[in-house]
């Protein structure tokens, strides 16, 4: 009960618990008002220790901040010096962005910083004492610890002049290999970069229960910081021989570089088990025995064409011709070439049969060494128990022979197998072949993916839910934080108001309710601006968060005069003089008259980007607009009617940027927003967003980001031009969906609004068509939908849902079934009550060849067409 209460209290204070898929970053002020940052994660001290060193190095290099830190198995605590976070939320956000270094940079950051750590000083003292470099004057007496520290400090001061000093290098090796787990840290940071591990940032009034336990350790560590021993203070002056360290850490550790499939293919080839290496003649069977060594009858049959039916007659023929014979090796009968009989006799103790010519029975020097060398040439990386078990030899005898071969350069030892846990032996030529094959596979992996992979990647990158079972709804703070993340990712992109809360936000926030957006707006965490009308009752809006006003549509009053008219000028004048006003005040300022005329003028200014509202109620009211009437004077005694719902809330002029920014700063912010939204940015995607200046405007910024290493440039998606830029983590996720996952069809199918930023078709990708030149292009129209299955656009639902357009992938029965199942999401609670379908591909539904497929998918016939109704 206490444990559950502890977890509940942490969840209530911090909003979420740290898990293997979520890291909690908590910030709060301590008793003196200084900021504390606490990273809560379950990955353990071996990950947190090097991570702490990297954070200290990044803050020191980028911002010139010297911070105090502590780590444990439960997280990392950072104290910011007084005044360093006085810049407000922007400064804190800048500091928090440095808490997660790039996986590629982490090793260099740790190596450069570990020498200045107390851990290094204490390990050096232990290693020096173990190496008898800190002798005692009287061996029988105990030396005080403080004196040991002083002696170690003196030794460290001398050793730091020589980068290859053995105890120095051994201390580096011990810290980096035994104490730290850099591979696990790289995996965690790569997961953060790929967004597989979420970051939950929260500001609390005081430390949460989890953070409080870390602060207790912090107090214990820094209570007597002024008494830090001299060795710890001098440890930062160390030099390091990087080449020697690299040798000690072992560059033969190739588990992460070598490909498991390439290793399996190579082993089949070396053992003549691949189709192109099988024996097809008598002489080739003899060559098998000479090349591979001892083989059982079944093993020979497995390496012969025709299913091995001719293996036994060929072996008897070789025996009769005295070209091969059988020996009992390791307790089992084996076939060998007659040339090897003395080698097996002297190497593994096999008894040679009678009748072997004396020419084959001469003594063989280093017989076991020769057998092991051949074993290595015909196998992948192996452990010594494998040949020992096959030949019935003690493992120690085999180990000694392998060591001799390694000393002679015949074998190498290292960590080669991707699934291995110990250091293996391998022939150098086999290792070279394995590297070449792995490199060939890696080169195939870096080839550009097909265009459909972008349609598999983009919805997942933006966190859009598939058409499978609904996700568990988010509650409370978690829902608000997820909505804030979504708004940040969509900042600056124009989205039709009619689909924003009906399609876009619910697809990204499980259990979305309109009140969440209202609550976020009331907190001042989100605002909106119009960007062009789409007919009388709809238009495009741009969302943005505080501090990101630079992403709003840019408007130059000198060149863009906006809507002109007496009512428009009156509304501008009133809002400019009085500030935020309700509709009744605006109506009076505009000279009264019919509501419809005043509303039209007001919404002209809204869609022109000049006026906005402090709520989202007017945007929702456009979808369910009721008639407005105020032309007649109210009767005496009649209750006053309510104002029109599309005029609710307070209206105000769109405020200027709090701090004027240069064009370069604006383009920089736009480029970062585009990268965050798309992950992999291509010219066509930028052009589809209709940004001022287009792709050529942000291209210099993207190129500069590439020069600083923050983004990568390459040819990632086939057919979309060479100027493609991507975040490092996005590249891995894009290549991970190179091929469709047949085992997860429901999770990889989506029903998206055509105007949803997660739909690449009609923007970055062209619509797939059947080759009919007379058919009109499919528009990215508000109210239309597209069903995407495994990255292929299958079905286009036109606005209103009365007509469908099938795409080439619709011919696949599995994709067709999945797309029609996805379309069922258009009806139900909070959606349409009924979808009435009258035409498919311009053909009346009664004459369509797909009528039966629609009936099987749940449509019911009616006198007007086929209807799809909610099941519950």
Image (cartoon, grey):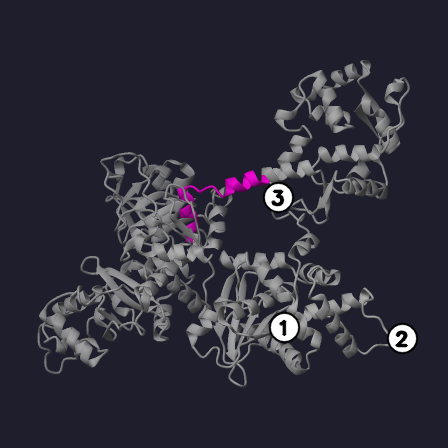
**Range of the magenta residues?**
438-459
Q: Do the residues labelled 2 and 3 touch (CB within 8 Å)?
A: no
Does 826 appear above or below 666? Answer: above
Residue in the image at 73% along x and 41% along y: 382
Mark 2 residue crowding within 10 angstroms, few (<14) / some (14–19) / many (20+): few
Q: What element carries label 3?
A: loop
Q: Which of marks 2 and 3 is nearer the N terminus?
A: 2
Q: Identify the residue position indicated by label 1 in the image.
A: 3
User: Residue 325 falls in which quadrant of the image?
Assistant: top right
Question: What numbered label is drawn on residue 138?
Answer: 2
Say left or right for 733 vs 296. left
Could you tell me which residue is drawn at 68 percent across and 69 percent down?
A: 119
Label 2: which secondary element: loop
In the picture, the quarter occupied by the N terminus is bottom right
Looking at this view, name the residue that lies furthest to the bottom.
32
Viewer-side label of 2, 1: 2
Task: Report crowding for label 3: few under 14, some 14 to 19, many 20 or more residues within 10 A (C-alpha).
Answer: many
Give how far apart the Cα atoms at labels 3 and 1 are: 44 Å
388 part of magenta stretch? no
Residue annotated with mark 3: 258
Does residue 67 appear left or right of residue 830 in this picture?
A: right
Point out residue 188 in the picture as x, y percentages from the top left corner.
Answer: 57, 59
Residue 15 versus residue 360: which sits nearer the camera?
Answer: 360
The location of residue 124, given as percent across then percent down, is: 73, 67
From the viewer's perspective, tell me whether residue 89 is left or right of residue 568.
right
Numbered circle sitting on residue 688: none
Residue 772 in which image quadrant? top left
Prevailing SS of the magenta stretch: helix
Q: In this view, does 493 lie above or below 383?
A: below
Question: Would residue 649 appear left or right of 140 to someone viewing this image?
Answer: left
């Amino acid at each position: 009960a206490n444990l559950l209460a502890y977890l509940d209290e942490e969840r209530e204070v911090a909003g979420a618990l740290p898990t293997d898929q979520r890291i909690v970053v908590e910030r709060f002020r301590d008793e003196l008002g200084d900021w504390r940052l606490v990273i809560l994660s379950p990955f353990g001290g071996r990950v947190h220790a090097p991570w702490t060193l990297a954070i200290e190095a990044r803050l020191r290099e980028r911002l010139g901040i010297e911070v105090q830190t502590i780590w444990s198995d439960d997280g990392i605590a950072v104290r910011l010096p007084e005044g360093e976070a006085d810049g407000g939320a922007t400064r804190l956000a800048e500091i928090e962005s440095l808490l997660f270094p790039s996986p590629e940079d982490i090793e260099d950051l740790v190596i450069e910083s570990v020498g200045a750590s107390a851990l290094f000083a204490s390990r050096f003292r232990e290693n020096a004492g173990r190496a008898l470099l800190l002798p005692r004057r009287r061996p029988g007496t105990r030396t005080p610890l403080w004196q040991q520290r002083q002696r170690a400090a003196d030794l460290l001061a001398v050793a730091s002049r020589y980068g290859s000093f053995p105890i120095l290098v051994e201390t580096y090796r011990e810290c980096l290999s035994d104490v730290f787990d850099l591979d696990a840290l790289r995996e965690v940071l790569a997961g953060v970069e790929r967004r597989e591990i979420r970051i939950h940032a929260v500001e609390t009034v005081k430390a949460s229960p989890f953070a409080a336990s870390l602060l207790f350790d912090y107090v214990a560590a820094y209570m007597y910081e002024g008494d830090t021993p001299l060795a710890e203070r001098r440890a930062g002056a160390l030099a390091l021989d990087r080449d020697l360290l690299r040798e000690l850490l072992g560059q033969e550790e190739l588990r992460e570089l070598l490909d498991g499939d390439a290793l399996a293919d190579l082993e089949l080839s070396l053992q003549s088990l691949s189709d192109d290496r099988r024996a097809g003649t008598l002489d080739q069977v003899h060559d098998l025995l000479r090349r591979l060594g001892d083989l059982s009858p079944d093993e020979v049959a497995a390496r012969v064409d025709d299913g091995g039916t001719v293996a036994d007659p060929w072996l008897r023929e070789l025996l009769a011709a005295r070209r091969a014979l059988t020996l009992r090796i390791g307790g089992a009968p084996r076939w060998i070439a007659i040339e090897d009989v003395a080698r097996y006799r002297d190497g593994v103790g096999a008894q040679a049969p009678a009748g072997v010519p004396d020419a084959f029975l001469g003594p063989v020097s280093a017989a076991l060494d020769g057998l092991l060398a051949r074993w290595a040439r015909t196998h992948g990386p192996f452990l010594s128990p494998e040949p020992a078990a096959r030949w019935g030899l003690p493992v120690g005898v085999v180990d000694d022979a392998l060591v001799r071969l390694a000393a002679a350069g015949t074998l190498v030892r290292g960590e080669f197998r991707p699934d291995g846990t110990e250091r293996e032996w391998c022939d150098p030529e086999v290792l070279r072949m394995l590297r070449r094959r792995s490199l060939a596979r890696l080169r195939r992996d870096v080839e550009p993916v097909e265009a459909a992979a972008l349609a598999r990647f983009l919805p997942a990158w933006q966190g859009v839910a598939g058409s499978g079972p609904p996700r568990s709804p988010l509650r409370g703070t978690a829902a608000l934080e997820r909505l804030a993340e979504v708004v940040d990712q969509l900042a600056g992109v124009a989205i039709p108001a009619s689909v924003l809360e009906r399609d876009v936000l619910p697809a990204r926030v499980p259990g979305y309710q309109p009140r969440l957006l209202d609550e976020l707006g009331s907190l001042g965490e989100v605002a909106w601006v119009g960007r062009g009308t789409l007919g009388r009752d709809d238009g495009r809006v741009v969302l943005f968060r505080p501090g990101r006003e630079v992403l709003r549509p840019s408007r130059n009053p000198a060149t863009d005069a906006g809507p002109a008219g007496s009512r428009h000028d009156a509304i501008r004048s009133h809002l400019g003089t009085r500030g935020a006003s309700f509709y009744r005040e605006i109506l009076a300022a505009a000279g009264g008259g019919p509501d419809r005329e005043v509303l039209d003028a007001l919404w002209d200014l809204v869609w022109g980007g000049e006026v906005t509202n402090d709520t989202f109620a007017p945007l929702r009211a456009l979808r369910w607009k009721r008639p407005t009437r105020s032309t007649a004077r109210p009767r005496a005694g009649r209750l006053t009617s309510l104002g029109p719902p599309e005029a609710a809330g307070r209206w105000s002029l769109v405020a200027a940027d709090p701090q004027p920014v240069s064009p370069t700063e604006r383009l920089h912010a736009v480029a970062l927003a585009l990268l965050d939204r798309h992950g992999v940015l291509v010219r066509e995607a930028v052009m589809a967003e209709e940004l001022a200046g287009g792709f050529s405007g942000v291209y210099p910024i993207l190129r500069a980001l590439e020069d600083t290493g923050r983004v990568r440039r390459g040819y990632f998606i086939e057919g979309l031009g060479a100027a493609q830029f991507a975040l490092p983590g996005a590249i891995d996720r894009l290549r991970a969906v190179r091929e469709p996952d047949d085992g997860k069809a429901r999770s990889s199918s989506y029903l998206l609004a055509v105007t949803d930023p997660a739909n690449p078709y009609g923007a970055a990708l062209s619509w797939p068509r059947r080759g009919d030149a007379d058919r009109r292009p499919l528009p990215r129209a508000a109210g239309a939908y597209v069903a995407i299955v495994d990255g292929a656009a299958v079905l286009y639902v036109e606005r209103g849902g009365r007509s469908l357009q099938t795409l080439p992938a619709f011919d696949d029965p599995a994709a067709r079934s999945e797309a029609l199942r996805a379309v069922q999401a258009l009806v139900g609670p909070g959606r349409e009550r009924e979808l009435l379908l009258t035409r498919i591909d311009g053909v009346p539904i009664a004459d369509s060849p797909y009528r039966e497929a629609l009936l099987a998918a749940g449509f019911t016939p009616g006198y007007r067409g086929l209807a799809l109704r909610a099941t519950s």
